[in-house]
Image (tube, helix red, strand yellow):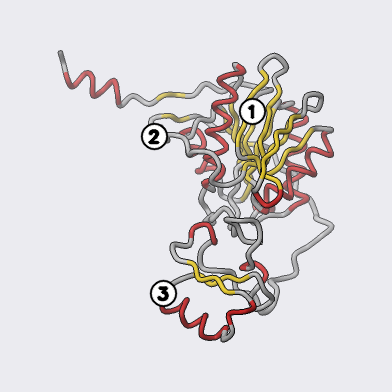
Amino acid sequence: MDVSYLDLLMAQQEEVTEVEGGGIWVVADLSTTLKAGVVDGAVAPVTLEALGAARTLADALGAYVYGVLIGDGVADLAQTLYQAGADGVRVADHPSLAGFALEPYVKVLADLFEAEQPEVVLFGATETGQELAPRLAQRMGGGLIEHVVAVSLDEATRTVQATFPIYGGEYFEIAACPEARPQFLTIEPGAFPAPFMDTYRKGEPTMLEVEPVEPAVRVVGPAEGFEPPPVPLAQAPVIVAAGRQAGDFEMVKRLATALGAQLLSNAELIAILLRVGVPGENA
């Protein structure tokens, strides 16, 4: 057997055929967020996890998976979505979309989804996803389930049944949107396994026309006296926690510094983004 022929065969790139309409859509999260641990200019891990979940749902439904990229200079990231399992990618690349801006992002996605009529739309349960998903669900008359940690499928009605935590993660409930379409879900970071990245899989993204929108609300600047933590709490290798009864809080700070740990608390002793909230996450 000619080994060189096998090597050549395995190295052939899989060209993804573009398809239109319906399907399972994943909106990529590219923002730097405390929960998702995203670095600017990279696809968030939760987006890849959502693509893996979307691929499973799509295969069961006989549907296609689409990814959506929004931002400025993001077109090159389309191949990452193809490698993670997307069959098609839509890209809205425009200087007016640099950084997260709520109103322009909602307009781009609303126009796209009204034209494509997706069955299911997945976001990461990040600050960006939690801003976009409810507004789009309300605008399109869809259903919304947030902080999803597991999904199953009623294939007869093509309805996603989503599991989400309640009471701080002590219990879980299952919800579905049998009548509402699209079905919007926000995926909790780390709840789903990341898909295999097939580096031989590629495709040609569809570029969307973007009409600049003048937002009614503008960001005037960062809040004074606030420093974000060096890494998200979920990714910190060492954590030092202290409550009101700790006594000398300055000593606790020195301990955290000596250990190279991230400091958090459930009291007013510390910045609000480092206070303990839901188990395993910061408030």
Q: Which residue is mark 2?
A: 199
Spot occupied by residue 60 in the image (x, y as percentages of width and height): 58, 19
Q: Nearer the viewer, residue 93 or 192?
A: 192
* Amino acid residing under circle 3: Leu
- Between disc 2 and disc 3, the foreground one is 3
Which residue does the numbered mark 3 point to in the structure image?
Answer: 259
Quarter of the figure with the N terminus: top left
How crowded pointer 3 is (Cα within 10 Å; few <14, some 14-19, many 20+) is rated as few
Q: Please identify the quadrant where the C terminus is shown.
A: bottom right
- Is 6 located above or below residue 92 in the figure? above
| Residue hosting label 1 | 24
Residue 70 is situated, as x and y percent measured from the top left of the image, at 63, 45
Query: Along the polypeptide, which appears first: circle 1 or circle 2?
Result: 1
Q: Residue at x 57, y 47 (%)?
A: 189
Q: Residue at x 64, y 48 (%)?
A: 169
Image position of 75 with respect to 114: above or below: below
- Whether residue 198 sits left or right of residue 246 in the image: it is left
What amino acid type should be assigned to the residue bearing mark 2? Thr
Q: Is residue 99 left or right of residue 49?
A: right
Question: Within 10 angstroms of label 1, few (less than 14), some, or many (20 or more) residues?
Answer: many
Local secondary structure at mark 3:
helix
